[in-house]
Image (cartoon, rainbow, N blue to C red):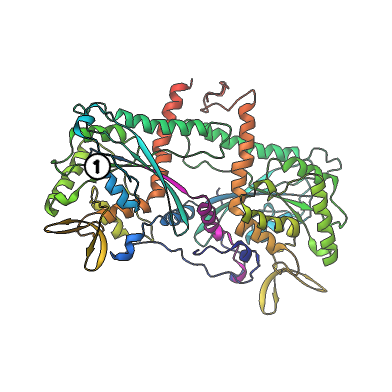
Amino acid sequence: VGPVESKNEAAMSELVPEPRQKPVVPMKPMGINASLLGYIGIDTIIEQMRKKTMKTGFDFNIMVVGQSGLGKSTLVNTLFKSQVSRKSSGWNREEKIPKTVEIKAIGHVIEEGGVKMKLTVIDTPGFGDQINNENCWEPIEKYINEQYEKFLKEEVNIARKKRIPDTRVHCCLYFISPTGHSLRPLDLEFMKHLSKVVNIIPVIAKADTMTLEEKTEFKQRVRKELEVNGIEFYPQKEFDEDLEDKTENDKIRQESMPFAVVGSDKEYQVNGKRVLGRKTPWGIIEVENLSHCEFALLRDFVIRTHLQDLKEVTHNIHYETYRAKRLNDNGGLPPMTVETEENHESNL
Amino acid sequence: YTRPVLPCQFSDSAGYVGFANLPNQVHRKSVKKGFEFTLMVVGESGLGKSTLINSLFLTDLYPERYIPGAAEKIERTVQIEASTVEIEERGVKLRLTVVDTPGYGDAINSQDCFRTIIQYIDNQFERYLHDESGLNRRHIIDNRVHCCFYFISPFGHGLKPLDVEFMKALHGKVNIVPVIAKADTLTLKERERLKRRVLDEISEHGIRIYQLPDADSDEDEEFKEQTRASIPFAVIGSNQLIEVKGKKIRGRLYPWGVVEVENPEHNDFLKLRTMLVTHMQDLQEVTQDLHYENFRSERLKRTGK
């Protein structure tokens, strides 16, 4: 089937990018001949949709949560091969840890292969950094719900925008500290609360502090703990659409996740190639080398294969859940037009 | 966002992120889901609507047709008949619904004959609006009419009063594509004259027919212009296969020759079909963004405070 690569192939890391194929576009109708008798051209609708996607571009909003110093900003920069995180926009090394959790959203437009992406990275400095971290996830949950509310308000407007701007959080990377023991109570509390409103992808940060055996054991223990505590991280079992999805996602859920990653924005020369890595006296840790860490798996998973699905689950599941709750609330839906703020009766 | 577009910051071989693969991900999901499209056909009896639809989609949507006599037609009002067929081509599944409107223009007094049609279109909008506002939105079915082929008789001198009234009433509710039926009753010169008359009358009455969007950078601009210049499409349909030069083709056999349906020199059938299938996505988009949104805002303004 045409240019679609199977998901399994895409999961293998590549140090050399695949050649970018120009999509096949039917430009002129084929000449009249007998073979035309059987062909209508319905399949061209796929091309039309592809063109539309490329023309309109797309939004992607990714949130990073975790204690200070776990390498969140570096990892996001590594994921998108650009200086897109909060730390890149005038970061001061002497910056103090904020006293409460702050939400900082930074947007960039990046382009690749003719596809434009409006990427927003939402950082949450201060999370888990206080002495008393009780309820420190609340500002985050509030932010996420505020984006749903914003979208909902646009949707019920009488005169709607053609393309409602999407600021909803599509993916939340939760950074687990590589202690080697187990999850911390804060990790469990956060994921328990937030997995119900957003797609959470747990990652083990700074994985170069563990040996291969320690890594495998730690991952197993974390998976067990998540399961025992009923935490459904992305990809959630109940949203597998068909057998194909289930088989693929089962493998990811039971073997690969949580991804043990290392991030870096520095390049070094290894075997004649420039690679992203960390240089230590005992060797160079190559970020995109699967035998060193699982960064490439995370990248392929989030960007190359499940990007669209992350958005769809956010829109079709999390957002709809929020909306249904709002419909049932006493207050009902927000008023139709901005002017009638006082009128809170549901008009639908 | 005031930030400029950032170039990839790292050397080229390591610079590939991979989100350019997004269209493929969308493609995969779309193919799995399949597509829906609703096409309405409107025109007097006997203009070859059913034959044309069968020719367009290489299906037999009307296997056992019962054609009523004139006396029966006197009492008839306009009916709405929807037939759905599933077409699959190269792995792409399309659920096509054809909405037929038998009885249109048949009555001696055709005063209200398009009221039923307007009601049908509005009902689909109403249903969609209701579903869209409901609690469970996971499986909304889109039965809204995405495109309406309006059949113009080749026997007149242009648009009839009924044609004008219909198009004026419907151009704000559905994408109208005017089609000159049974084009083989006209010579090429007569065809051109009729097309020009029809276009003049359409603009005279301020009728808004479906406009083809401008060609993209990698589309054939010339081809698009040619297509635009052929509207209204003068078409011929046929369910019969005739052997011409050793090949079996769809056509009509006359003593003076064979009219070939898929011969661009004989009629605009291929242009119509190509235009339809390559603009299915746009037709749906215009229905959603223009016609449906108009309906919705009117409805909400009426019931709102």
The residue closer to the viewer here, A291 or B170, is B170
Q: Would residue A259 be seen by someone viewing this image from the given angle? A: no
Q: Residue at 75% of width from left, 40% of height from top? A: A193
Q: Residue at 61% of width from left, 70% of height from top? A: B11
The residue closer to the viewer here, A80 or A194, is A194
Is residue A265 covered in magenta? no
Residue A166 in the figure: left or right of residue A211: left
The residue most toward the bottom is A272
User: x and y percent of residue B176 in the render?
Assistant: 30, 41
Q: Residues within 10 Å of mark 1 (few under 14, many from 20)?
A: many
Classify residue B48 by image quadrant. top left
**Where B63 falls versus A25 (above or below)?**
above
**Where A219 falls versus B287 (above or below)?**
below
Q: Amino acid at mark 1?
A: Phe
The residue closer to the viewer here, A231 or B143, is B143
User: Label 1 marks which chain's residue?
Assistant: B
Classify residue A321 by image quadrant. top right
Q: Would residue B262 be seen by someone viewing this image from the given angle? A: yes
User: x and y percent of residue A290 in the render?
Assistant: 72, 68
User: x and y percent of residue B62 in the render?
Assistant: 33, 44
User: x and y percent of residue B178 in the render?
Assistant: 26, 43
Q: Main secondary structure of the magenta part?
A: helix
The residue closer to the viewer here, A8 or B202, is A8
**Where B39 falls versus A111 (above or below)?**
above
Residue wearing tag 1: B151
Q: Residue at 43% of width from left, 35% of height from top? A: B293
Q: Residue at 80% of width from left, 64% of height from top? A: A208
Is residue B22 covered in magenta? yes
Residue A287 in the figure: left or right of residue B282: right
- For the record, the magenta segment spans B13-39
Instruction: Give the secondary structure at mark 1.
Output: strand
Q: How many labels, in total?
A: 1
